[in-house]
C-alpha cells in the first residue's frame, strides 16, 4: 500500500488516473481463475480407461553413461491422441526401498537435480526441430527446443499440462500437449507422423534411460527418434496476454508505468499469428555478468515471451556461433545513443501450406531513431532431405543504412549413417558511405558408422564484406576454415571397472582470412570418463599454433601470436546426501608468452527439497594478459581475477517461488610491459607507459514469483548493481571485492503482472 501511494503521489493528474486504472486491473486479474486446458484429467494417476488403448514403449536402454545397457529399473511410456491434444504418460518402476530424489527447481532449470522424465517430440517427423517437455518427480517442469540435432534452447515456454504422482513401488507422470502448441502441416482427420524420444533420469545413479537408443551426445539425435503415427485433430486458440509493469528507479528517484499486450491466434493447426504492442522487455530475468576486452561481441539469450514463442522456424545458425536472426537486436541499443529502444509493435506469422512451412516477422521501433526489422522464412521438408530459404531486411533511417541478408539452406540424410547440411549466404549493405555485397557458405558432413565412432568435417568461407549483424549475430567474417572432429566411445568395460564409459574427442581447426593470412591452427584432445558412482571426470589439452590474430588490433594491423597451450581437468560429483560439488583446474596462455592458471569451484547445498543454495568461485592468476590499447599499441598485464556468485531458490508453497541471485566480477591488473606491432606482425617491446587498473562489477536480484495460472505470473523484483573502472587502484583484491558490493549504478524495484485470457 505504501508503494502504491508513492506511485500515485509522484504522478501528474493524468498519470494518477492511469495508475488507478492499472491498479484496478492488477487487482481484478490477480483473482481470476485460469480455465482448464482439457477434459482429460491430468493428475499423474493414469486412472482413465483410455490409457489402455495407448501406444506403449518399454525397451529403454541406458544412454548416460552411453552403454546401451539394460536399465536398473523398468520404464514404460505411453502416447495417446485425444481431441484435446497429445497425451503422454510415463510409468517409472522404483521399489520403495530405493532412493528417490525430489528436489524442486524453477521452470526451465538447466538441471533438475531430481528424478525426472522427458518427452522429446518432432511434430513434423522431419528431424529438423524437436520440442522438449520434462517433468520431475516433484512436479518441476522444463520446456524448450532442440535444433540442428543437438542445439538445445530453453527460451521457449509452451502452454501445456503436467502432473506427477508417487506410489510405493513406482511413480508416474502425465502430460497433455494441446494441438495448438506447435504449427503442423496435417489437418483434421489425417494421421500424423511424429518423431518421439522418451527419457528417464535416475538421479541417484546419474543415469539416463531412453527409448529409442538416441543420445544427444551423438552427432545424430533428432533424426534417430522413433517414428509413430497417431490420429490428428484440428484446434483453434485465441489468447491475449496484457501486462503491466511499475518500475521505481531508486537512483533517479523516478517511477515509470508501462503497459503492453501480446496476442496469439491460431485459427487452425496450419497457421499461427502473434502480435505485440509495446512488448515486454523481460526485466524479471537478468543476464550473467560479463567484462569483455575481446574484439568480438558477447552473445546473450532472450526471455521475452513474444520473441521466444514458436521461434524455431527462424533459428538458422552457422559456424562459428552465428545466428541469422538474433532477437536481441530488436529493441536493442538504439542508433542515436546506445540505450535500449522501445518497440512500437511487432507481428509474427507461422504456418504451413501443403509441403511448405513458412514464417514472417516484422517489428517497428519507436522514435526518430527507430529501426524496422523484417524476416521471411520458407522450408520444404521431406523424409530424407529439406531445402529452405530465409531473408532479413533492416531499415535504419537514423544511420541512413539498409541491410539485406539472404540464406539458402539444405539438409540431406543418406541412409542411417550419413548427413550433409549447409548454407549459402549473401548480404547487401546500402548507405551513402558504402554499397557492399558479401557472400559466404558452410558445408557440414557427418559420418556415424557405428555406435562407437563418429566423424565430422565442416568447411566454411565468409567474405570480408559479408555482414549479417544488423539483424543477426556474426562472431566474425573474412574467414576460410576447415573443422574436423573424431569421437570414440568405449562402453564394453569389465563389470568391476570403476568407469561406466570412456569417450575420446580429437578436434582440429585450420583457418585463415580471405587474404591468405594463416590464423592459429587448433588441435585438442579431450577424454570424458563417467564413473559407476555417478561422478564425471574430464581432461583436455589444446594447442594453438603460431599464427596471426587479425581482429585483436581492431583494424590496425596483423598481430603474430606465439604457440599457446591450454589444459584443464574437471571433476563433478553426483549428489551425495545434501551436497553436490564440482571443481576444475586450468593452466593456459592468454598473452604473448607466459602462463596463467585458474580454479573453478562450485557446490550446491540441498537444505530441503524446496530450498537449495548454489555457490560458485573462480579465481584466476595471469602473468601475461595481453590487451589492445589504441592504434598499434598493446600492453601486457599481470592479473588477478575473481568471479563468483551465490544463488538461492526457495519454493515455500505450490506456485510460489523466491529466488536470490548475486554475482560479482573483479579484475585487478598491474601494468608490466608495453608493445607495438613490429615487422611481420610481431609485438615489439616499447617504452610506452602501462598503468594498472581495476574493474569491479556486481549484480543482485531478489525475485518473488507467483504463478497465477500457466504462463500468467505476478513478479515482485528488487535489483541492484553496477560496473566501475578504477585507474591505478590502491586497494587489494579484498578491498575491491568489498567495494563491488557497494556499487549502485542501478537500484530498482519492479512489480510486473502478465495474465492470459
Image: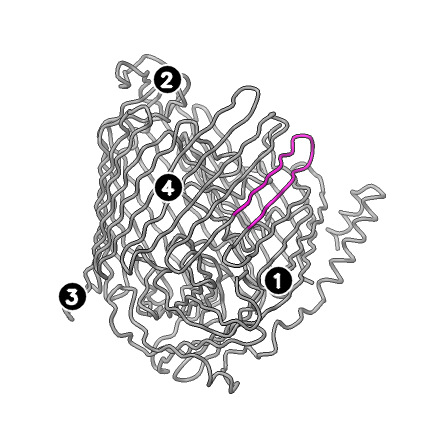
Q: Nearer the viewer, residue 105 or 302?
A: 302
Q: Is residue 162 visible?
A: no
Relative horizontal placement of residue 68, taking residue 212 as reference (left or right): left
Q: Quadrant of residue 587?
A: top left
Write down the region rendered in magenta.
359-377
Asked if residue 301 is among those painted magenta in the image, a careful observer would answer: no
Mark 2, residue position:
633
The kind of secondary structure element at disc 3 is: loop
Which comes before the other along the chain, label 4 or label 1?
Answer: 4
Mark 4, residue position:
319
Which comes before the other along the chain, label 3 or label 2?
Answer: 3
Q: Main SS type for the magenta part?
A: strand
Identify the residue at horizontal 41%, vertical 38% (top origin): 734
Which comes before the other along the chain, label 1 or label 3?
Answer: 3
Mark 3, residue position:
493
Which comes before the other along the chain, label 3 or label 4?
Answer: 4
Q: Nearer the viewer, residue 460 or 699?
A: 460
Q: Residue 211 at what x, y percent from top left?
A: 34, 71
Relative horizontal placement of residue 253, taking residue 434 as reference (left or right): right
Q: Nearer the viewer, residue 223 or 574?
A: 223
Amino acid at each position: 500500500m505504501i508503494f502504491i501511494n508513492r506511485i500515485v503521489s509522484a504522478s501528474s493528474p493524468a498519470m494518477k488516473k492511469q495508475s488507478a486504472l492499472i491498479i484496478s486491473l492488477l487487482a481484478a486479474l490477480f483473482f481470476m481463475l485460469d480455465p482448464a486446458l482439457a477434459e482429460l484429467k491430468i493428475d499423474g494417476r493414469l486412472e482413465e480407461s483410455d490409457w489402455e488403448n495407448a501406444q506403449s514403449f518399454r525397451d529403454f536402454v541406458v544412454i548416460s553413461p552411453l552403454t546401451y545397457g539394460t536399465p536398473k529399473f523398468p520404464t514404460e511410456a505411453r502416447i495417446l491422441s485425444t481431441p484435446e491434444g497429445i497425451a503422454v504418460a510415463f510409468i517409472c518402476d522404483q521399489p520403495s526401498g530405493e532412493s528417490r530424489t525430489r528436489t524442486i527447481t524453477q521452470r526451465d532449470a538447466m538441471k533438475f537435480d531430481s528424478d525426472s522424465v522427458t518427452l522429446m517430440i518432432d511434430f513434423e517427423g522431419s528431424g529438423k526441430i524437436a520440442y522438449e517437455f520434462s517433468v520431475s518427480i516433484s512436479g518441476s517442469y522444463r520446456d524448450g527446443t532442440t535444433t540442428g540435432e543437438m542445439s538445445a534452447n530453453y527460451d521457449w515456454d509452451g502452454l501445456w499440462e503436467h502432473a506427477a504422482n508417487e506410489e510405493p513401488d513406482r511413480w508416474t507422470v502425465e502430460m497433455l500437449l494441446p494441438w495448438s502448441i506447435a504449427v503442423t502441416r496435417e489437418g483434421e482427420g489425417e494421421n500424423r507422423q511424429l518423431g518421439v524420444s522418451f527419457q528417464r533420469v535416475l538421479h541417484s545413479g546419474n543415469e539416463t534411460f531412453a527409448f529409442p537408443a538416441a543420445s544427444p551426445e551423438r552427432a545424430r539425435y533428432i533424426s534417430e527418434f522413433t517414428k509413430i503415427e497417431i490420429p490428428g485433430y484440428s484446434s483453434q486458440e485465441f489468447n491475449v496476454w496484457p501486462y503491466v509493469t511499475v518500475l521505481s528507479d531508486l537512483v533517479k528517484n523516478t517511477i515509470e508505468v508501462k503497459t503492453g499486450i501480446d496476442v496469439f491466434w491460431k485459427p487452425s493447426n496450419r497457421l499461427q499469428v502473434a502480435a505485440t504492442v509495446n512488448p515486454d522487455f523481460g526485466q524479471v530475468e537478468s543476464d550473467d555478468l560479463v567484462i569483455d576486452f575481446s574484439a568480438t561481441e558477447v552473445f546473450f539469450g532472450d526471455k521475452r515471451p513474444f520473441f521466444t514463442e514458436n521461434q524455431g522456424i527462424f533459428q538458422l545458425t552457422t559456424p562459428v556461433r552465428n545466428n541469422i536472426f538474433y532477437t536481441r537486436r530488436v529493441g536493442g541499443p538504439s542508433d542515436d545513443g546506445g540505450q535500449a529502444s522501445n518497440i512500437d509493435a511487432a507481428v509474427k506469422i507461422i504456418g504451413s501450406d501443403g509441403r511448405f512451412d513458412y514464417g514472417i516477422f516484422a517489428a517497428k521501433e519507436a522514435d526518430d531513431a527507430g529501426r524496422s526489422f523484417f524476416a521471411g522464412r520458407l522450408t520444404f521438408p521431406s523424409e530424407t532431405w529439406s531445402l529452405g530459404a530465409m531473408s532479413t531486411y533492416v531499415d535504419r533511417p537514423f544511420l541512413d543504412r539498409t541491410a539485406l541478408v539472404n540464406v539458402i539452406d539444405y539438409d540431406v540424410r543418406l541412409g542411417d549413417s550419413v548427413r550433409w547440411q549447409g548454407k549459402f549466404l549473401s548480404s547487401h549493405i546500402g548507405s551513402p558511405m558504402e554499397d557492399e555485397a558479401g557472400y559466404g557458405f558452410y558445408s557440414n558432413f557427418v559420418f556415424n558408422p557405428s555406435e562407437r565412432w563418429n566423424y565430422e568435417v565442416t568447411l566454411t568461407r565468409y567474405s570480408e564484406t559479408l555482414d549479417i549483424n544488423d539483424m543477426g549475430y556474426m562472431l566474425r567474417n573474412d574467414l576460410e576454415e576447415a573443422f574436423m572432429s573424431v569421437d570414440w566411445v568405449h562402453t564394453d568395460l569389465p563389470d568391476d571397472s570403476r568407469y561406466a564409459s570412456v569417450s575420446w574427442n580429437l578436434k582440429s581447426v585450420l583457418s585463415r582470412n580471405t587474404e591468405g593470412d594463416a590464423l592459429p591452427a587448433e588441435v585438442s584432445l579431450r577424454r570424458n570418463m563417467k564413473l559407476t558412482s555417478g561422478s564425471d571426470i574430464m581432461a583436455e589439452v589444446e594447442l594453438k599454433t603460431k599464427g596471426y590474430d587479425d581482429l585483436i588490433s581492431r583494424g590496425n594491423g596483423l598481430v603474430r601470436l606465439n604457440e599457446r597451450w591450454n589444459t584443464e581437468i574437471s571433476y563433478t560429483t553426483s549428489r551425495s546426501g545434501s551436497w553436490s560439488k564440482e571443481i576444475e583446474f586450468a593452466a593456459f596462455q592468454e598473452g604473448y608468452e607466459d602462463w596463467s592458471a585458474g580454479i573453478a569451484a562450485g557446490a550446491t547445498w540441498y537444505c530441503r527439497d524446496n530450498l537449495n543454495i548454489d555457490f560458485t568461485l573462480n579465481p584466476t592468476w595471469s602473468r601475461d594478459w595481453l590487451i589492445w590499447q589504441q592504434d598499434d599499441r598493446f600492453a601486457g598485464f599481470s592479473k588477478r581475477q575473481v568471479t563468483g556468485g551465490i544463488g538461492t531458490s526457495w519454493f515455500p508453497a505450490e506456485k510460489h517461488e523466491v529466488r536470490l541471485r548475486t554475482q560479482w566480477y573483479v579484475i585487478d591488473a598491474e601494468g608490466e610491459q608495453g608493445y607495438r606491432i613490429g615487422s611481420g606482425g610481431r609485438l615489439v617491446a616499447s617504452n610506452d607507459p602501462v598503468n594498472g587498473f581495476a574493474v569491479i562489477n556486481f549484480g543482485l536480484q531478489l525475485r518473488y514469483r507467483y504463478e497465477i495460472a500457466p504462463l500468467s505470473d505476478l513478479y515482485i523484483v528488487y535489483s541492484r548493481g553496477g560496473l566501475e573502472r578504477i585507474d591505478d587502484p590502491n586497494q587489494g583484491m579484498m578491498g575491491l571485492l568489498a567495494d563491488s558490493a557497494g556499487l549502485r549504478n542501478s537500484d530498482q524495484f519492479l512489480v510486473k503482472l502478465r495474465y492470459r485470457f
